[in-house]
Image (tube, helix red, strand yellow):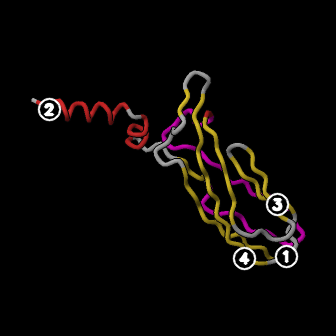
Amino acid sequence: MKRNVAYLLSFLILVSCDNFWECLIKVNPEINELQIQQAYIDRPYSQFITAHITNEPSDDYYEYFFEVLGPLPEGLDIWYDYRSVEIFGIPKETGVYRLTVLLTIGAYDDGEYYDANPTCDGTTQRSFVLEVFD
């Protein structure tokens, strides 16, 4: 009997934890793009990298924090805007540039419910190669 009570208490503690449910249904951040377009010297360039949260219809209520690691060619810059990152500008040098985009998901807050740790895995990343041609 004591063993059954212990199992029941363990189960109730586990399922009352938000993170348990988020992992069970795989609520995770995702970067949508698999690759980015190539660029050309002295031509305007714009590439958006966007994100969403899988299995979460209310993903607009989350906080999205991006970071782009790696060098950009001269003439290109980065703009962070809520659920997207834009790489833009007019490249001035050719080359192959390896970038990593990191995404961290912050709190969920729809005005009625607040969850400080709203996803199973709060971070994801994706590597990209930006090629700039003449």
Inter-mark Cα distance, 1 to 2:
68 Å
Disc 2 target residue: 4
| Secondary structure at numbered mark 2 | helix
Callout 3 secondary element:
strand
Name the N-terminal-most of marks 3 and 1: 3
Determine whether 27 is above or below 4 in the image: below
Mark 1 vs mark 2, foreground winner is 2
Mark 4 Cα-neighbour bin, 10 Å: few <14, some 14–19, many ≥20: some
Name the residue at the left extreme. 1
Sequence-wise, the earlier of marks 1 and 2 is: 2
The mark nearer the N terminus, 2 or 3, is 2
Q: Position of residue 118 (x, y in %)?
A: 51, 38
Please, which residue is most extreme toward the front here? 2
The relative height of residue 93 versus residue 102 in the rendered view (above or below) is: below
Q: Residue at x 68, y 56 (%)?
A: 67
| Residue hosting label 3 | 77
How would you rate the neighbour count of disc 2 (Cα within 10 Å): few for under 14, some for 14-19, many for 20 or more? few
Residue found at x 32% / y 33%: 13
> In this image, 79 relative to 119: left or right?
right
Where in the figure is residue 31, as x and y percent of width and height? Answer: 59, 53
First along the sequence among labels 2 and 4: 2
Q: Amino acid at mark 4?
A: Val
As drawn, the residue found furthest toward the right would be 42
Say if mark 3 contacts mark 1, CB within 8 Å.
no
In this figure, which residue is indicated by the disc labeled 1? 93
Relative to the observer, which residue lies in front, 10 or 95?
A: 10
Q: Which residue is mark 4?
A: 96
Q: Secondary structure at mark 1?
A: loop
Amino acid type for the residue under numbered disc 1: Glu
Q: CA distance from mark 3 to mark 1?
A: 13 Å
